[in-house]
Image (tube, rainbow, N blue to C red):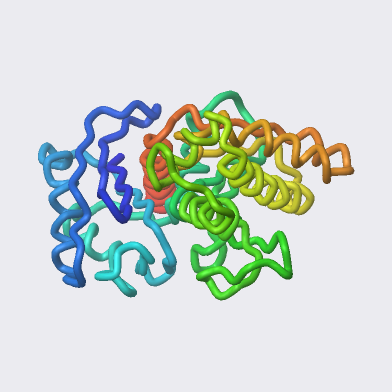
C-alpha cells in the first residue's frame, strides 16, 4: 500500500506492507504561498520514488481538513493554496490503475492506532492535540467518515456553551481550551511570563518547573478534553481513547493524569468510567498506517467487486 499524509508543514509518504510494516518512507516540506500546483508537485514528488518499482495495490490519503470524500477534494485550513483541491484525482494520475481512498488526518490516526496499536478493541476514539484538535472514531474495524468525511471532529464538541468563540464559528469548543496555541494564549492572558520559550514546549517546561499559570493552562485543557471524551463515550460506548499530536507527544505527563481525573469527576455511568485513555505508541506513524489501512480496504473492495 502507498500511504500519504498531507499536513501543513510536511507531506509524508510510505510504502506499507499488508501486515502494517513500513517498508520505505519519504517526506518533503509543504510549500507555502497560494500556488496550488506547487503543493501538488510536492505530493507527487513524495510518492514518486516509492512507486518507482510499481506493484502498489492502492493509495490511501490522510489530509488535514475540511475535506469532501465524495468529491475527492480537500481544503486544509493550514494549506491556503488548496481550496476544494482534487487530491484524489491528482494521485490517481500519479499512480494510475489502482484505487485511491481519502480520509481526514485525525481519522487516519485513529485507524492506524486501531490496526497497529496496543491490543484489540471494538470502539476507539483517536484524538490529535496539536495546533488544533482533531480526531476520528473506529467501530468494528471501520473508520466513521460520515457523508462528506467530516465525522470525528472531537475538537469542535462544545464543552462550555458560554465559552469563548472558536475559529470554526462555534462557542466553547475543546480546541479553544486544549490546542497548543490556545493554552499558550490563555497562559499569557493570565500573566505567564515565558521562562523557557513562548510556545507550547516552553509552556510545558515551565509547568514542570512549577509555574502555577503554566500548570493551570494544561489542567484547563485537560478538563476540556475529559469532558469531550465523556460525551463521546456516552454516545458511542468507547473502549479506548488514544491521544496523539504535538502537544501530547511533548507533554503527556502533564495531560494524561488530569484528563483521567477530569473524567472520573464528571462521568457517572459505569460504561463511561471504564474507558481507557492512553498516549499513542505509534507517534507520527499512526497517520500513515491509517492511510495504508484505508488503501488496503479500498483494494479489497475492488478485488471483491471484480470477482463478483
On the image, the x and y values in percent for residue 223 come to 69, 47
Question: 167 or 86, which lies in front?
Answer: 167
Q: Is residue 109 left or right of residue 273?
A: left
Number of residue marks: 0
The residue depicted at 75 percent of the width and 41 percent of the height is 262
Q: Is residue 307 visible?
A: no
On the image, the x and y values in percent for residue 271 come to 83, 39
The residue depicted at 56 percent of the width and 29 percent of the height is 253
Q: Is residue 32 left or right of residue 284?
A: left
Question: 54 or 161, which lies in front?
Answer: 161
The residue depicted at 26 percent of the width and 65 percent of the height is 89
The residue depicted at 19 percent of the width and 62 percent of the height is 40
Q: Is residue 17 left or right of residue 210?
A: left
Question: 119 or 253, which lies in front?
Answer: 253
Q: Is residue 99 visible?
A: yes
- The image quadrant that residue 42 belongs to is bottom left
On the image, the x and y values in percent for residue 195 come to 42, 39
Q: Is residue 62 above or below residue 255?
A: below
On the image, the x and y values in percent for residue 134 come to 52, 53
Q: Tell me the quarter of the image containing the N terminus.
A: top left
Question: 288 or 53, which lies in front?
Answer: 288
Amino acid at each position: 500500500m502507498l500511504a500519504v499524509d498531507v499536513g501543513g508543514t510536511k507531506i509524508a509518504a510510505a510504502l506499507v506492507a499488508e501486515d502494517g510494516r513500513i517498508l520505505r518512507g519519504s517526506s518533503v516540506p509543504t510549500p507555502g504561498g497560494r500556488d496550488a500546483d506547487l503543493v501538488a508537485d510536492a505530493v507527487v514528488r513524495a510518492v514518486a520514488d516509492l512507486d518507482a518499482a510499481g506493484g502498489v495495490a492502492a493509495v490511501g490519503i490522510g489530509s488535514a481538513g475540511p475535506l469532501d470524500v465524495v468529491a475527492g477534494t480537500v481544503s486544509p485550513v493550514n494549506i491556503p493554496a488548496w481550496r476544494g483541491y482534487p487530491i484524489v484525482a491528482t494521485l490517481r494520475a500519479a499512480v494510475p490503475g489502482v484505487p485511491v481512498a481519502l480520509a481526514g488526518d485525525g481519522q487516519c490516526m485513529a485507524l492506524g492506532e486501531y490496526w497497529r496499536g496496543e491490543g484489540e478493541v471494538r470502539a476507539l476514539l483517536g484524538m490529535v492535540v496539536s495546533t488544533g484538535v482533531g480526531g476520528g472514531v473506529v467501530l468494528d474495524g471501520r473508520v466513521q467518515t460520515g457523508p462528506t468525511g467530516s465525522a470525528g471532529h472531537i475538537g469542535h464538541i462544545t464543552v462550555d456553551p458560554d465559552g469563548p468563540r472558536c475559529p470554526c464559528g462555534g462557542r466553547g469548543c475543546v480546541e479553544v481550551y486544549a490546542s497548543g496555541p490556545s493554552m499558550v494564549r490563555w497562559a499569557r492572558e493570565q500573566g505567564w511570563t515565558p521562562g523557557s520559550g513562548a510556545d507550547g514546549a516552553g509552556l510545558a517546561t515551565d509547568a514542570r518547573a512549577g509555574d502555577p499559570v503554566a500548570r493551570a493552562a494544561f489542567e484547563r485543557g485537560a478538563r476540556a478534553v475529559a469532558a469531550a471524551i465523556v460525551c463521546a463515550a456516552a454516545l458511542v460506548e468507547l473502549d479506548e481513547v488514544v491521544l496523539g499530536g504535538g502537544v501530547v507527544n511533548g507533554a503527556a505527563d502533564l495531560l494524561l493524569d488530569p484528563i483521567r481525573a477530569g473524567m472520573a469527576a464528571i462521568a457517572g455511568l459505569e460504561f463511561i468510567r471504564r474507558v481507557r485513555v492512553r498516549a499513542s505508541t505509534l507517534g507520527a506513524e499512526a497517520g500513515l498506517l491509517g492511510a495504508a489501512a484505508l488503501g488496503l480496504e479500498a483494494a479489497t473492495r475492488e478485488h471483491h467487486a471484480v470477482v463478483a
